[in-house]
Amino acid sequence: MVKRIFNIFYKEIVGLHEAAYLLGIFALLSQLLALVRDRMFASHFGASTILDVYYSSFRIPDFIFATVASLVSISVIVPFITERLGKDQEEGKKFINSIFYFFSILIVSTSVIAFFLIPYLVPLIFKGLSAENFPSIILTTRILLLSPILLGLSNFFASLTQVGKRFLVYALSPLFYNLGIILGIIFLYPIWGIYGLALGVVFGAIMHLAIQLPFVFKSGLFKPWPAILDFQSIKNVVAISIPRTITLGMTQISIIALLGIASFMERGSISIFNFALNLQSVPLTIIGVSYSIAAFPTLARLFTNGQRDEFVSHIITGARHILFWSIPVSVLFIVLRAQVVRTIYGAGNFSWSDTKLTAGALAIFAISVVAQSLVLLFVRGFYATGNTKKSLYTSIGTGVFTIIFSYLFVKIFNSFLVFRYFIEHLFRVDDLIGTDVLMLALGFSLAQVLNCMILWMLFERDFKGFSAPLLNTLFQTFSASVIMGFVAYLGLNIFDNLFNINTLVGIFMQGLCSGLLGIAAFILVMKCMKSVELEETIKTLHKKFWKVRPIIPDTKEL
């Protein structure tokens, strides 16, 4: 039985749609756990100071993970491993060992330095928070410094599972991570308070790492023995990684800056921002991350082998299906925002005011979900070609514009009553305080859309004709999604009279029935327009992709 379970978890998956859908299913499961986690946070604490402290404590560890761990990220290291193993198995193993020990030393050293700098950084970043919260943030942050070490190692080993196309292992790891956090809320918080929450994160990171290890050791690609560092290989990897490191670092800096601005706003604004950001990450993870991850190993192989046309075709296929899935989901999030937020977070100490503010921020974030999903694919496409500078420059610009846009929108929002009234009335929050937090979401979304437009143009310039096959998909999907949104909105008014929306079950059923009505309209319209993406989706589902027979690769291909 154990062996059978092992074979299921660690078997190879081939095919873009099969891998993407498998990743999507487990990403959905992981996101459902994440929503359970956030619902527990909302129920226990609401949009409160304690959650502001908890989310603030993540910023420095997340920055370390995004920057240092990106040096050996999957997007960067997979092409190196594929190339080395393709030439010589032993050379590939030496390369893997050398990078592992270099990274281990670097991530631990960085975390130790951060441990001593945290007391000076926290008051500088979160000036708007009360000084009495600083000791809690400092200690919680220090505990969370274990997470970038554990997740960084897990991320490194995940590159080996990706090379072996063991997507199921990769897909399960975030599920275990969220499970650890939930266990921390249930069992550790009652004992140690907010520090128990941090320990739950660490426990989740341990499980995130542990699930990677069986395949890693069984594959024989990694042996835990001391290695002589190959500085030339390290130099090559770092040279390629630096643009990505700066890219992710800039993203984290922009988030830190937005939370710094939020610290000057109404109490709970940091929590509202994070709740909405986490919700918009659900479709982003299920669609954008799944397709980009599933496509990347093949993209790297195709470009390395000089198969340029197949490479472009693979990118186009991924982009078409990202548009097909993400546009309607974004529209549903906008139309059903209150039902989504109230169903997921509406319990315990999470008030109706918290619900309306989070729903408004979610709607604004949803505008950029399509753009963010495409950016993930474009960036991995550029990484597969070995060109990391383009995504570097655009990401730096995106980070800068995120901060500038958000700051300016907050200033305009607080200075011009007409603009403030328009935004508050549009999102139906005109009777609340703390509405300026919506401007942070607006600045973030506009910057992401701008980033997507630039990367799209750069891809079109490098690969002429890339855009043409996408325009039909964009037109069909957008048109059908608008109709879907209108039908779903009508459904809200219809089901408002059928269900008691003052109860959790009632508001859930109102949103569910309205959403299903809209989805039915979307499928009907796409069917009438003879959507290729719809047909491909149906064919893929008919294949029972979870039962796809694995193709055992030649050792040289592994």
Image: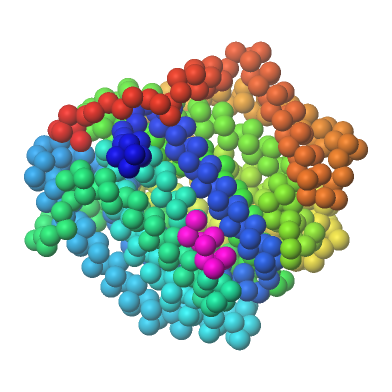
Q: Is residue 188 left or right of residue 100?
A: right
At horizontal 54% and vertical 81% (from top left) the residue drawn is 136
Left or right of 305 in this view: 290: right
Q: Decide whether residue 5 is among the magenta residues.
A: no
Q: Is residue 74 left or right of residue 442?
A: left
**Which quadrant of the figure has residue 210?**
bottom left
- The coloring applied to the image is rainbow
The residue depicted at 71 percent of the width and 42 percent of the height is 334
Give x and y (percent) for residue 6.
32, 41
Point out the image quarter for the C terminus. Answer: top left
Residues 229 and 178: in front is: 178
Q: Is the residue 241 above or below the residue 143 in the image?
A: above
Location of residue 504 with respect to 83 vertically, above or below = below
> Residue 471: x, y in percent?
55, 24
Q: Residue at x 52, y 62 (%)?
A: 183
| Relative image position of residue 272 (x, y in whole percent) | 67, 62
Give the left or right position of residue 123, taking residue 261 as reference: left
Helix, strand or loop for the magenta stretch, by majority: helix
Which residue appears farthest toward the front when viewing the image? Answer: 1
- Residue 481 placement (x, y as % from top left): 68, 29
- Count of number-bearing discs: 0
The answer to which image quadrant residue 284 occupies is top right
Q: Is 509 above or below relative to 149?
A: above
Is residue 180 magenta-colored? yes
**Residue 484, above or below 85:** above
Between residue 370 and residue 229, name the one nearer to us: 229
Q: Is residue 470 visible?
A: yes
- The picture quadrant where one finds residue 368 is top right
Identify which residue, 546 or 136, lies in the foreground.
546
User: Foreground residue, 336 or 28?
Assistant: 28
* Segment colored magenta: 179-187
Q: Who's the residue at 34% across and 39% down the image? A: 1
